[in-house]
Amino acid sequence: MTEPQQQPVFVIEKIYVRDLSLEIPHAPRIFLEREAPEINLQLADSHSVIDGEIYEVIVTATVTARLKEQDKIMFLVEAHQAGIFRISNIPGEEVDPVLGVLCPNILFPYLRETVSDTVTRAGFPPVILNPVNFEAIYHQKKQQEAAGSQPAQPENTVTRH
């Protein structure tokens, strides 16, 4: 008799804020400004093995609000949203896409909330991060790795009105 194939296991063990920083370099005068800032978003993700089939995945957002006319930073928020995931009985070549696409997709709504809440608590209107296509980012990284170049981090610029 053949041994029954074990079912794939994917479990979210923990989701947490690993690191969070806020800078308002021109406070309190910056709160008197009426110019709409330009919002710049930089995203990155990483993962590491904690123990055997347990992984930590981190999605990092760096949000910078800058007054374009004055070239003055209103605020800068950097948030590292992390998760611990148990992944087993998944073929080796399929683990990397799970860590690079599925896990960041799970973490991103938490990251969005962390950034928005931090900016609001700092006294500014909330910054709502637009959805991100982590699958496209993953495939872009793989293509760049295959070409032998350093993967570029996605960057979005949005002007708030």
Image (cartoon, rainbow, N blue to C red):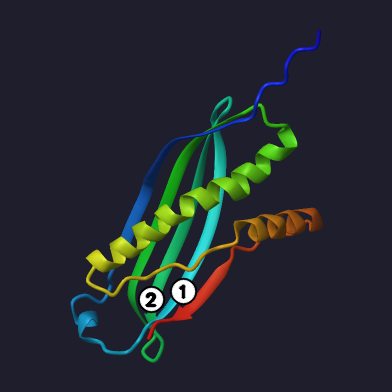
Residue 24 seen anywhere in this rendered image of the structure: yes
Q: Which quadrant would residue 118 be assigned to in this image?
A: bottom left
SS class, disc 2: strand
Earlier residue among tags 2 and 1 = 1
Q: Residue at x 32, y 71 (%)?
A: 126
SS class, disc 1: strand
152 left or right of 15 in image:
right
* Residue at the far left in the pictured view: 28
Q: Where is residue 104? Give x, y as percent.
A: 54, 50
Q: Name the residue under label 2.
A: 65
Question: Tag 2: residue type?
Answer: Ala
Give above or below for 100 relative to 79. above
Nearest the camera: 161 or 63? Answer: 161
Q: In which quarter of the image is the C terminus?
A: bottom left
Question: Tag 1: residue type?
Answer: Asn
Label 2 vs label 1: CA separation? Answer: 6 Å
Q: Where is residue 136? Give x, y as percent.
A: 67, 60
Question: Counting other residues with Cα less than 10 Å from the Cα at mark 2, is it few (<14), some (14-19), or many (20 or more)?
Answer: many
Q: Which residue is drawn at 59% across and 66% down?
A: 154
Return the mark for residue 95. Answer: none
Q: Which quadrant would residue 10 be assigned to in this image?
A: top right
Q: Do the residues labelled 2 and 1 touch (CB within 8 Å)?
A: yes
Q: Which residue is drawn at 21% across and 75% down?
A: 27
Q: Mark 1 points at which residue?
A: 40
Q: Where is residue 67? Give x, y as percent.
A: 37, 85
160 left or right of 6 in image:
left
Question: Counting other residues with Cα less than 10 Å from the Cα at mark 1, is it few (<14), some (14-19), or many (20 or more)?
Answer: some
Give above or below for 158 relative to 11. below
18 left or right of 48 in image:
left
Nearest the camera: 6 or 67? Answer: 6
Give above or below for 48 relative to 151. above
